[in-house]
Image (cartoon, helix red, strand yellow):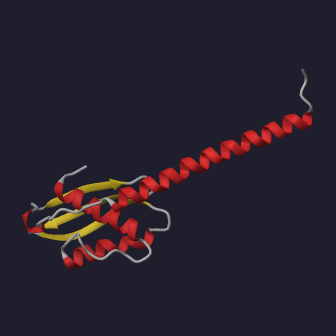
Amino acid sequence: MKLSPKKILSFTAILLFLIGLILAAVYLKSVADYKMAVKEITFGNVDISDVPNGVYIGEYDVDFVYAKVEVTVQNGVITNIDILEHKNGRGSPAEVVVDRIVEEQKIEVDAVSGATNSSTVIKKAVENALTGEK
């Protein structure tokens, strides 16, 4: 039995459509998982005055957003935070959150409007640096 070119074309179109649906579903599931992961981020109470002098590296990853930071502590004070890596969609404005952390000397600072998820991930990376968490 030989298939006509029209039937082959129809079969190919249906197959491509189904593959597209599957890929869309996988993507939407990934986005939902990412949003849930960000929503579930909690912060501990880090007493910066108890952190020994040094330079600490911390990171946090929720698939669509990743941050790696270097935090410098001197005499119980955060003196500098460098963002070593920040994978984000449109969340690069969130990078100013590290300035807020240095100014206020606490991790729980206000997120940057429009870049809340990136702000949260960066803050968690800072916390992980100070606590040694992975």
Left or right of 131: which side holds 38? right
Residue 101 against residue 4 in the figure, above or below: below
- The reply, left or right, for residue 65 in relation to residue 28 is left
Q: Nearer the viewer, residue 61 or 77?
A: 61
User: Where is residue 57 shown, x and y percent of the image?
Assistant: 25, 55
Write down the quadrant of residue 38 in the picture.
bottom left
Residue extending farthest to the top is: 1
Residue 112 in sight from this viewpoint: yes
Q: Is residue 66 visible?
A: no
Residue 121 x %, y %: 34, 62
State the image coordinates of residue 84 (x, y, percent, origin top left): 35, 59
Instruction: Report the side of 76 relative to 93 (left or right).
Output: left
Answer left or right for 104 relative to 21: left
The part of the image, by quadrant, that contains residue 15 is top right
Q: Is residue 26 above or below residue 1?
A: below
Q: Residue at the location (22% across, 61% down)?
A: 127
Q: Position of residue 81 (x, y in %)?
A: 27, 67
Q: Residue at x 35, y 68 (%)?
A: 119
Residue positioned 45% across, 68% down in the render: 91
Query: Measuring 64% from the left and 47% from the top, which residue is drawn there?
Result: 21
Image quadrant where one finds the N terminus: top right
From what the image shows, is residue 123 above or below residue 61?
Answer: below
